Amino acid sequence: MNIPNTLTFARIVSVPLLIWLIIEGEFFAAFVVFMRAGISDAADGYLAKRYGWHTELGAYLDPIADKGLLVAIYVALGLSGHLPVWLVIIVVSRDILIVGAVVLAWIMSRPVEVKPLAVSKINTFAQIALAGFVLAQLGLGLGVEGLVRVLIWITGALTILSAFVYFFGWLRHMMSYEPEHVEARPKRQSATSRPGIQGAGVRSAGNGSTRSEVRAP
């Protein structure tokens, strides 16, 4: 396991710690863990590109770590009453629907490649910014309640928009997908129906054996 994958795995391990800190009201410590997770995310991306440390494991772990951390923060802040429940439901439901759509396409042998769209990147940025400002407000008392309220509505709208964009793209893929057709194999001809061979007669020999006699047409 190289350095980028180690940093990614550390972010995954920090998910339960972050949930516990938020539920216990340790918002300053939660803000520190959140900031360290963001720095490690940027660091592993830079190292992977700079030194070519790209691996298949890292390609799967990195989005899992990012989404797992973000969803955990939203659920914990929602349970503690610092984010509206409707926003938490929208954020979590969007990710569940995307994963379910990809799995369903794979089960139906119609694999779809999920690429990050522009609206999805903006939505992710808004979700991260909202989580960071909420934790900063709770842990440092920055007095940004008005900004948090605006970000809540912006994040909710972007999350719904990105969900619809992904859904209609997935639906268009499923409707237009054409599976490969397997050509039927030609039937094998019997020996008597092959061209050039006709009237095979069987005669008994004196010793009781049989032989075939092929007559030319």
Image: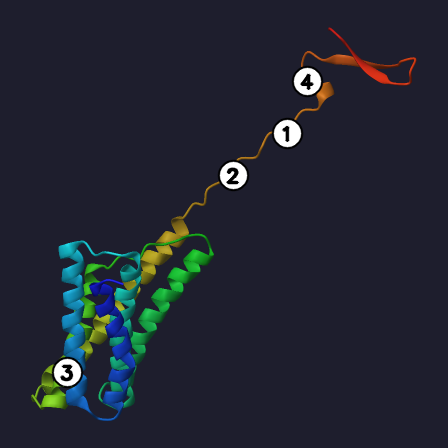
Residue at label 4?
194
State whether residue 148 is above or below residue 56: below
Q: Which mark is residue 182?
A: 2
Find residue 32 and name its label: 3
Task: Name which residue lies at 16% across and 73% down.
Answer: 38
Cα separation between marks 2 and 4: 27 Å
> Label 4 sits on what residue type?
Arg
Residue 171 visible to the viewer: yes
* Residue with the mark numbered 1: 187
In primary-sequence order, the first of circles 3 and 2 is 3
Point out residue 16 in the picture as x, y percentages from the top left corner: 29, 82
Q: Name which residue type carries label 3.
A: Val
What is the C-alpha distance between the residues marked 1 and 2? 15 Å
Q: Is residue 149 visible?
A: no
Give the secondary structure at mark 3.
helix
Quadrant containing the C terminus in the rendered view: top right
Q: Amino acid at mark 1?
A: Lys
Residue 14 vs residue 91, the one in the foreground: 14
Image coordinates of residue 213 in percent, x first then y, are 79, 11
Quarter occupied by residue 190: top right
Image quadrant where residue 155 sits: bottom left
What distance separates the C-alpha of mark 3 from that of mark 2?
58 Å
The three-letter amino acid code for the residue at tag 2 is: Val
Q: Which mark is residue 101?
A: none
Looking at the image, residue 119 lies above or below residue 84: above
Q: Residue furthest bottom?
A: 24
Q: Are marks 3 and 4 in contact (CB under 8 Å)?
A: no
Residue 98 x/y as whole percent: 34, 65
Q: Nearer the viewer, residue 71 or 167?
A: 71
Crowding at dot 1, Cα within 10 Å, few <14 / some 14-19 / many 20+, comes out as few
Q: Secondary structure at mark 2?
A: loop
